[in-house]
Structures are given as structure tokens and as C-alpha cells.
Amino acid sequence: MQTLKLVAVSAGLSSPSSTRLLADRLTKAAEGRLTEQEYAVEVQVIELRDLALDIAKNFVSGFPSEQLGAAIDAVTGADGVVAVTPVFTASYSGLFKSFFDLIDPDALTGKPVLIGATGGTARHSLVLDHALRPLFAYLRALVVPTAVYAASEDWGSGGDEYTEGLPSRIRRAGHELADLVAARGPAGDADDDELVPFERQLADLRLD
């Protein structure tokens, strides 16, 4: 049985945090899908609020602390990444952006990444497409087609006749991430000089 690594990055600042909750549920959906496909799954969650000072010090010293270095290694070594941020001033949080600024621009190339965001109102949902998706496109990550935004009113909502409820969106996005991760295989087995074409990975998606 192959073991795949999923890493969730949460930029939530409070505890408990809706951002962390969304990251956990997205990761759980992907983990369940991979388990159904008979993969063993290792899950790690990185809370950026615990690394805030280390991230700031890295910018002035040029070197990561041991804890921050381990977090960066976990993300770059993962088979799939779930990245979730709260919305501040119509974009991702500064802490979220600062963490990914510290990652080598080539380290996420071709890596499946599921993006998510939380906010107080649905009016901020476009942050996924005008801020997060361009960020990970710049990093040449393989961004999962379905991104998930959760406003306060989405929690506990079943949606309506025109929109899917949050649990449905989480399940669909998690399954898409899992299928991309399974198609790509463990990161350690991949040839760093050979990328799987995006079209082939999309063709391997098996959507319900």
C-alpha cells in the first residue's frame, strides 16, 4: 500500500478558527477519497499563527528557524496541499502570503493544491479567483478546479436550488484533490525533470 502525504496550511488567527475548520474538512474529504482508493494517508496541519514571528524573522535574517524550516519542507515534500486563508481587505492575509513568499518559486511546480478561503460575507468569494488562484499559478502549482469559499452563513447551510451547500463543495473539491494526488503518485517517486501534463491529470479525474 502506497503512502501519500497531505499537508494543510491554515492562516487562521483565532482559536477555534473557521479557517482551520475549513482546512480540516477539505483535508478529511481528500483523505477519505484516497483511503477508498486503498492508499495510506499521512496528514499534517500547519498553523501559520504559530509561525508568525519565525516568518517575520526569516525576512530580516534570510534564514528560517528550525520550526519554520520543517513547515516549509513539509509543504514542498507533500503529495498534495490544502491552503486556506481568511480574507483581509479583499485578499489573502499577509501572514498567508508571507509564508508562501518564503517557499522556493519552483518547489510547488506541478504539485496539486486545493485553495480555500473564509470570510464574514459571501461578497468576498471572488478572492479565490482574483488572488489565490493567480498566486499558485505563478508558483506553477496544479490548482484543483473547485476552490471553496465559506462565509459565516455557509456553515450549517444546505445551499439552495441554485447553489451547492458547503458540505457538497467541500466533498467535490476534496475528491478532485485526491484524484490529482493519486494520478501523480508519491512525490518521492516523481522525476523532478518530468512534469505530468495538466491535460493528462485532468483526464484522470473521476468525478461523481
Image (tube, grey):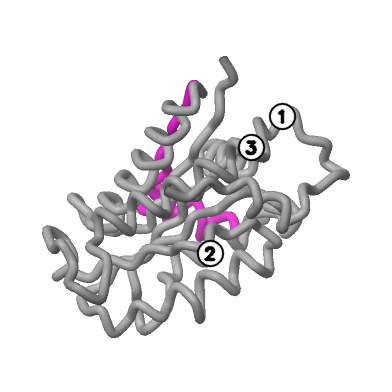
The residue labelled by disc 1 is 188
Q: Where residue 45 appears, x then y in whole percent?
A: 40, 40
Q: Is residue 168 magenta?
A: no
Between the C-alphas of marks 2 and 3, the distance is: 19 Å
Looking at the image, is mark 2 or mark 1 earlier in the sequence?
2
Q: Looking at the image, which residue is at 59% across and 36% down? A: 182
- Quadrant for the N terminus, please: top right
Q: Where residue 183 appears, x then y in whole percent?
A: 64, 39
Q: Which residues are magenta?
A: 40-59
Q: Secondary structure at mark 2?
A: helix
Left or right? Give the position of 91 relative to 80: left
Q: Is residue 50 magenta?
A: yes
Q: Foreground residue, 32 or 97? A: 32
Q: Looking at the image, which residue is at 67% across and 39% down? A: 184
The residue labelled by disc 3 is 77
The residue labelled by disc 2 is 98
Residue type highlighted by circle 1: Gly
